Image (cartoon, rainbow, N blue to C red):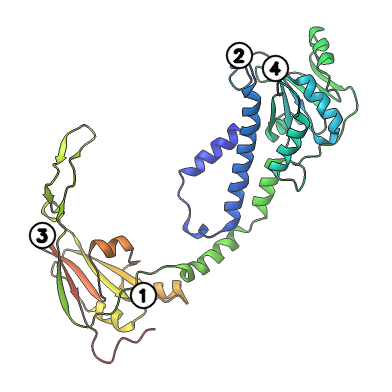
Amino acid sequence: MQRSQAILHALEGQPRPEWLNGQTEPLELKRQAMQVFETAQSLQNSALSIGTESSLSTNHSYKPLTLLFVSFSLGDEALKGIFEEVSGRDDVLLVFRGPKPGQKLPALMTDLKRLLKGIEPLPNIIIDPTRFQHWSVTSVPDIVVEEEGKNRLHVRGVSSLSWLDEQLKAGKQGDLGTMGDISEIAEIDLLEELKRRMAAIDWKQKQRQAIARFWQQQKFEVLPEAQSDRDRIVDLTITAPRDLTAPNGQLIIRAGQTVNPLDKMPFGLCLMVFDATVPAQVELIQHQSCQDKQARMMYLATSLPRQPGWDSLQRLETALQAPVYLLTPDVRSRFQLQHVPAVVEQSGNRLLVHERKLPASTGDRS
């Protein structure tokens, strides 16, 4: 459970690759991993709720811990007998490998609750395929006595705790072999199943499919075409609604104070905003210039041809000899963009938006 939790926590802070958006397989795998973790946590919490102060999860001493590996292949009657004998033993942990083939984890929980009905206190039960792998458990019942992380005693074909206690009192150690009947493990190995499902996914194909679908799913910030030449002024001055302080408490801006960021720092950009599906707009924007020759020119497209999107983008960037970015809602709002083609540049402590009408007999879309 701790390993599952660590994996899930590590994934939470990682950026999701753009090409994975819209994929159902990774989401399904993550949902299954979450289900594994939550079920294991639920089972362990149930055990700990009736445990003593020295319960398994909080016991950091080096007392021996008996792992009793079990499976539904033992039969309901045998399992119920094991549950009753283990009840109240905080030094014993019943370990299942996972659900049965085709069985969902909630169904496994239902089966366990059915067998645990009437047993008080509840035995300590977990689902932990890693312990099956670590101790090479391939049949049930199987008992491993852990002490300081090492194998003190290992025996197969035995589930009787009273017999085990007698062997420990007699000083028995090591691998005692098979001392009774054993059964195959009915449940799947959750870790191996997840690995199998991951390996079965053709990630390169999924990537190709996602890239091919990108332009079909892309949302564009489409703006209407300018019907006349128009210059507008955009004032970036803002009024602080409340005091703004640094983490150390130092006052930066008082409530009600007005601030224009262009008074402190130059804009440094010249934005060329256009609809890349209209060849005339592309041609017009190529011949536009900026007053500040030191400003960095940035091309923002409100729309691009969906078919073939990537090839069109590459040809466009080659023609402009610069990267082309898609216009985003926040940029559209911040610079109060209304029509295209348009040029946004700094003039004093204000921004100028130049909207330009296309020449006559142009404007056909590609």
- Mark 4 Cα shell of 10 Å, populated few (<14), some (14-19), many (≥20): some
Residue placed under numbered mark 1 in the picture: 316
Label 4 – label 1 distance at C-alpha: 70 Å
Question: Residue 203: x, y in percent?
Answer: 59, 58
Confirm or deny contact between disc 1 and disc 3 (CB under 8 A). Answer: no
Confirm or deny contact between disc 4 and disc 3 (CB under 8 A). Answer: no
Confirm or deny contact between disc 3 and disc 2 (CB under 8 A). Answer: no
User: Depth-wise, is mark 4 or mark 2 nearer the camera?
Assistant: 4
Residue placed under numbered mark 3 in the picture: 349
> What's the residue type where badge 4 is placed?
Asp
Instruction: Tell me the quadrant of the picture where the C terminus can be found.
Output: bottom left
- Is 305 drawn above or below residue 70 in the view shown? below
Confirm or deny contact between disc 4 and disc 1 (CB under 8 A). Answer: no
> What's the residue type where badge 3 is placed?
Asn
> What's the residue type where badge 1 is placed?
Leu
Q: Is residue 299 left or right of residue 209?
A: left
Residue 190 sits in which quadrant? top right
Residue placed under numbered mark 4 in the picture: 91
Residue in view at x 70 percent, y 35 percent? 129
Q: Is residue 263 left or right of residue 307?
A: left
Mark positioned earlier in the residue sequence (1 or 3): 1
User: Depth-wise, is mark 1 or mark 3 nearer the camera?
Assistant: 3
Residue placed under numbered mark 2 in the picture: 61
| Residue ranking furthest to the top | 170
